[in-house]
Amino acid sequence: MKLPVILLAAALLAAGCTGEQDPRVQVAEVVRATVAEVVDAPGTVGARATSSLTAPADATVAEVLVPDGAQVEKGAVLARLSSPAAQDRLKQALAARANASDAVISMPQANLSPLQDQVDAAAAASFAAGRTAVAQIPDPVLRAEASQRATQAERQYAAAAAAARAALAQLGAGAEGVESALAAVTGSQRAQAGAAVTVARQTVEALTVRAPISGVVTLGAGGAAAAPSGDGDLAGLISGLPPAAQGPASAALGAGSAGSGPAGGTTTMSGLVVGAPVRSGAPLLTVTDLGGLTVDAEVDETDVLLVQAGTPATVEVDAVPDASYPATVTAVDLTPTTSARGGVSYRVRLALLGGTTADDQPAPQPRPGMSAVVDLQVRTAENALAVPAAAVVRDEGRDAVFVIEQGRAIRREVRLGAQGADLVEVVAGLLPGAQVVVRDADRLRDGQAVRT
């Protein structure tokens, strides 16, 4: 009667060890494949170059030579401004330069050396006559005393003559120093006058508005914001002069603060109209180069070290959801910016190429300012040993997979390379053909019995 009970207990025990209680797992084979690691980042489409032009002085729009939206070449004349005040400042600066060039200051210098020479000659003759007289004194004692007095008198005169000549030299040097100082002053005046002419001439030349780059023209203040190439041209040019020349140049030209007119305001227009007054610094037009679009992407600090110039990418523009645009990284910023995701990020610049739609048709050209998502292909491993990304578990900073061996899940630490969205490269720790757990691997224990 006891034998059946023992057999039943053994059967139940065997069922608990190898039967229905063992968890069922899903496995995949370790194979060789191409693994592409991609870093995604938000981005914004931009133009290759944008330049905004402003009025160089208070003026009136005399001519507008291109329509809004026109494609122009670099150097093309786009508009002309009229500014009698700027012309007058140029004339005044030219007159001031002419006066400064004619100014010559010299110090009169008297040459007293011949007079000193005459005095020395007379003294020498007198001393010679005295020596002759001393020699005729018959008494030796008196003759010696007279000779000593004569020698002392000659020494005193020599000292006085030397002092006189030194004084004359100092007087001449002082006169030369004054003349040199006056020459430096006049030279500075000429330099300042020349600088004022340069500024005034450039202001007048800037009244003829030329395209700084090739691109599409937007008239008035409606263009995209950019660093204006003519923003306060007058004040900007003056600030570039040497410090000693800035004050006189500003006074000669009557320059004020950039962007402000007589009342301190700024004139802006939605277009550029002939006859309209514009104040110094007022926006005139913008030229945008659409010949080559760019993308600025914000790459997280954890991924930016994988990105470098030449890294290929794929860009998806929000406004064209069914299109894909190839791109290439051209530069990576060294300084961080505030990420749109709230962390530290670095700006990565890419050159954007023409895209295609889902049906292989040419995609529309994006416009500057459009939002985009950038997929940067930071690493690609070909013919690499690969496992599904779901097979990798991370424990205490180490990567591992569970390999099925004789019905049990064996934990194997691995070293990873390129990590794609679906597949990851295994650099070390696995052999081809091994069976790895790809579902719920994080719930297994090393050596646990499983069913596949």
Image: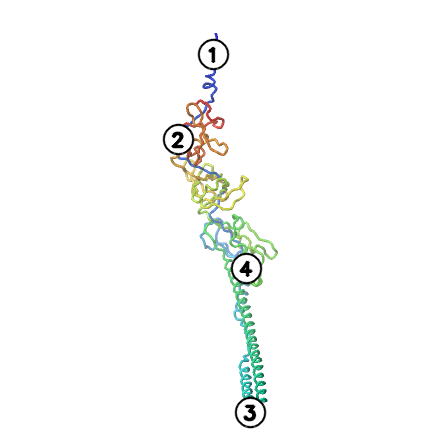
Q: Which residue bears the numbered disc 1?
A: 6
Say which amino acid is labelled 3: Gln
Q: CA distance from mark 1 to mark 3?
A: 168 Å
**Which residue in the protein does label 2 denote?**
431
The relative height of residue 239 versus residue 347 in the rendered view (above or below) is: below
Comparing marks 2 and 4, which lies closer to the viewer? Answer: 2
- Distance between mark 4 and mark 3 Cα atoms: 84 Å
The answer to whether residue 309 shows anywhere in this view is: yes
Mark whose residue sits in front, 2 or 1? 1
- 321 lies left or right of 153: left
Q: Position of residue 35 (x, y in %)?
A: 41, 35
Could you classify mark 4 by the number of other residues whose Cα lies within 10 Å: few (under 14), some (14-19), or many (20 or more)?
many
Q: Which sits in the foreground, 311 or 147? A: 147
Do the CB atoms of the residues marked 1 and 3 lie less than 8 Å apart?
A: no
Q: Earlier in the sequence, mark 4 or mark 1?
A: 1
Which of the two discs, 1 and 3, labels the residue nearer the N terminus?
1
Residue drawn 55% across and 53% down?
282
Quick one: SS at disc 2?
A: loop
Eye-nearest disc, 3 or 2: 3
Q: From the viewer's perspective, is residue 99 above or below residue 130?
A: above
Q: Amino acid at mark 4?
A: Ile
Query: Which numbered disc, 2 or 1, marks the residue that appears first in the sequence?
Result: 1
**Measured Cα–Cα span from mark 4 to mark 1:** 107 Å
Nearer to me, 355 or 429: 429
Q: Which residue is mark 3?
A: 136
Secondary structure under badge 3? Answer: loop
Residue kind at label 2, given as amino acid type: Leu
